[in-house]
Amino acid sequence: MSVIAPTLARIRTAQFGDHLVAWLLITPALVLLVAFTLYPAAATLWQSFFSTPLVNRPAHFVGFAHFQQMLADPVFVKVLVNNLLYAAGSIPASVALALLMALLVNARIPGRGLARMAFFTPTVLPLIAAANIWLFFYTPGYGLLDQLLHVFGLAGHNWLGNPSTALWAVTAVTVWKQAGFFMIFYLAALQQIPENLREAAAIEGASRWHTLRRVILPLLGPTTLFVLVNAVIGAFSQVDALFVLTNGGPDNASNLLLYYIFQNAFQFWDTGYAAALTVVLVLILAAASLVQFLFVGRRTHYR
């Protein structure tokens, strides 16, 4: 008994020391998480139920009034539809282009290193700089696209000033910017696929398309799920390019949800309504991620 008691005491002291070290290591991350994620999220949810404070009128509880206002707001409906179209256009295009580029630069082709660098270069550019490059492409009269149209005898087009093309012009910038970033993940995943699987498929007489569809794409499932989650988040967090290209115009034709939140919060100074819009944006992203993990994640093959 006299030997067991000191041994238990030493074990408890060692366990306490381990727990203390663990908490000291995670405390900085917890402080940052609470300060920059949890507290702002809780404060935004709280503000969405209050009116915007003014100089002579403090904020007061309005319940779900901002959310009811949202349903009657034609600009919000238009912005939400714009964002869904933008997501429907940018996500499949950027993911498919990233996969094609990864398959190309994973093959033994001449100049493979240069091709990888060229495909990845848009990713390292700040989005503001990328938008300025495309602003030159879209400039009416002397932009690159109009110059190409003139070569074929076609009239120029105001790509960013026309409501029918403004949103798709912004979508093209996003696809160009994101595809190289997603390509890196696909390229890393492709290099992890054992070569003997391709050889076995070739011995069985499978064509390249059959090998891609039945062997490679299923093994790329976890990467595709990761890329899709990031693409959805990116589709609903686009704001930088709009500052340079369209400012949401013309007539909100290219306005997106996050930019509309910025306008309400810092241009119209309606912080209560902006907080309610932010809550809706977070709910949309949470629902999209849940659907992806429940339906796409269950069909994903993990080695």
Image: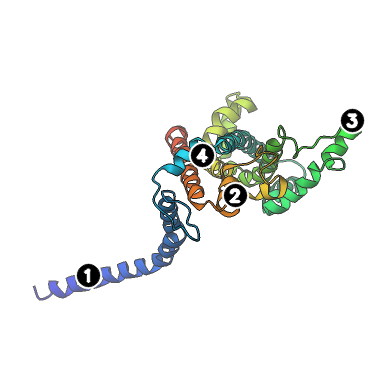
At which x and y percent is residue 5? 13, 73
The tag earlier along the polypeptide, 2 or 4, is: 4
> In this view of the protein, which residue sits in the foreground, 165 or 104?
165
**Amino acid carrying mark 3 in the image:** Phe
Between marks 4 and 1 in the image, the one whose residue lies nearer the viewer: 4
**Which quadrant holds the N terminus?**
bottom left
The amino acid on which the numbered mark 1 sits, given as a three-letter code, is: Arg
Graded by Cα atoms within 10 Å as few (under 14), some (14 to 19) or many (20 or more), the crowding at tag 1 reads: few
User: Marks 4 and 1, how far apart in space?
Assistant: 44 Å
| In front: label 3 or label 4 | 3
Quick check: 115 above or below 155?
A: below
Estimate the spatial distance between the alpha carbons at disc 2 and disc 4, rounded to whole Å.
32 Å
- What residue did someone put label 3 on? 152
Secondary structure at badge 1 equals helix
Q: Does any portion of residue 117 appear in the rendered image?
A: no
| 4 or 1: tag closer to the N-terminus | 1
The residue wearing badge 2 is 263
Circle 1 is placed at which residue position? 12
Q: CA distance from mark 3 to mark 4?
A: 42 Å
Question: Which kind of residue does numbered mark 2 sit on?
Answer: Gln
Q: Residues within 10 Å of mark 4 (few under 14, many from 20)?
A: some
